[in-house]
Structure formats: structure tokens, C-alpha cells
Image: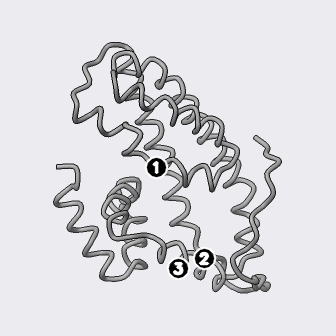
Amino acid sequence: MTTTAPAPAPPFPGTPRRSGEAEPDLLGVTIIHRAMRAATRLLAEAVGRIAEGEPCPRERQRAAEAEEIDLEPLVDDHTVLATLLRRADQALPDFARDPATGAAALAPLFAELADLLDEHIGEEEALAFPIMRTDVSVGDFDRVERMFRKGTSVGQLVFLLPWIADQCTPAERAELVAGAGRPLELLLRVTESTPPWR
């Protein structure tokens, strides 16, 4: 997959990694990518079953309504997916009005989105991760991760933490929890014991 969109400007002047220095830890990015792929695939499969006639109660329908899904971060971060995301966004109100007919239009869009996201993230990791490991300093990578965390609200964390943790192996989870700090560890325990959708 290729894109002609210009690369975004870096948020700060970088310090290249020097030979012999530690590589940045990409586990968090890898798990987030894995969670994005898994969630998109689950959404595609669920709406596909509705399109095939599976009942869709109102509570389930609300989970896929336009006002419940913020597609903008994917559009901003992955411009190659923008057209498909717009089409899916436009189809969501029809699903909200009538899941029986709306799912037939939405299911193939979500399936295509899941396939495209798999391809895009696979290529992104194959191309960018080796460069990040060899050329990005640990300090710069940690600084970027802190910038992302700073922009995440507690409400977003209540959803994101259990979603991301669900994609981890026990060893990955232990490593992420150890690096996240005590407040995030406690929030994860609370959100896993009382899921926000119940």
C-alpha cells in the first residue's frame, strides 16, 4: 500500500540513536496495533452476522452508531484509510435507523477496513519498526509516548486499558504494567473488574 500524503512534521527536533545505545521499546506500539486490528476484525464480523440475519438488539446497535464511534484518529493517523473511513461513517446512520438493512451496506465496508488495516499496519511495522529501532533514540521515543499519554483522558483510558491488555500475552502484560506506573495499573484493575459497558 502506498500513499502520496506528505509526512507530518516531527513534534520536536530528534536526537538520533548512537551505535551501541539501547533500542527503543516498541512493545506498546505493537500491542496497540494488534488491538486495532483485532477490534476492527471483530466489528466487521459482528456487522456481517447482522447482515446475514442475526438479531441486533438496541444495546448492540448503539455500540456501532455514528455518535459512539470516533473515526477521526484513524483518518488523521492513517490518511490512506480516509476514503474508506468516510464511507463507513456515512453508512453508520443507516445502521442506526435500521440494523437489518443498514448492516448489509456496512458489513462489506468494515470487512474492507479490517483487511486494509491489516495490510497497512503490517507494512508500517515492516518498514518503520526497523528504522525506529536503529535510528530513534530511547529518549526521543519515550518523549513521544509521553506526549500521546498526556493527550489521553481518564475516560478514554477506561476504554483503552482493558482493550489493549486483552491483546497481551501474560509476559507482555507484566512488562506494560511495570512500565505504566501505579496509577495506570490501579485503573486497569478497576476497569477490568467493572467493565464500563455494564
The residue mark sitting in front, 1 or 3, is: 1
- Residue at the (30%, 75%) spot, across then down: 185
Above-or-below relation of 136 to 85: below
Q: Residue 67's quadrant in the figure?
A: top left
Above-or-below relation of 115 to 159: above
The residue mark sitting in front, 1 or 2, is: 1
Q: Are marks 1 and 3 in contact (CB under 8 Å)?
A: no
Viewer-nearest residue: 159 or 134: 159
User: Which quarter of the rendered picture does the N terminus lie within?
Assistant: top right
Which residue, given by chain and number where applicable, does mark 3 sit on? Answer: 146
Q: Which mark is residue 121?
A: none
Q: Mark 2, residues whose alpha carbon is within 10 Å: few (<14), some, or many (≥20)?
A: some
Q: Secondary structure at mark 1?
A: loop
Image position, residue 59 (x, y; %): 22, 36
Viewer-nearest residue: 122 or 45: 45
Q: Which mark is residue 70?
A: 1
Which residue, given by chain and number where applicable, does mark 2 sit on? Answer: 144
Q: Tell how many labels.
A: 3
Viewer-nearest residue: 37 or 94: 94
Q: Amino acid at mark 3?
A: Arg
Q: Secondary structure at mark 2?
A: helix
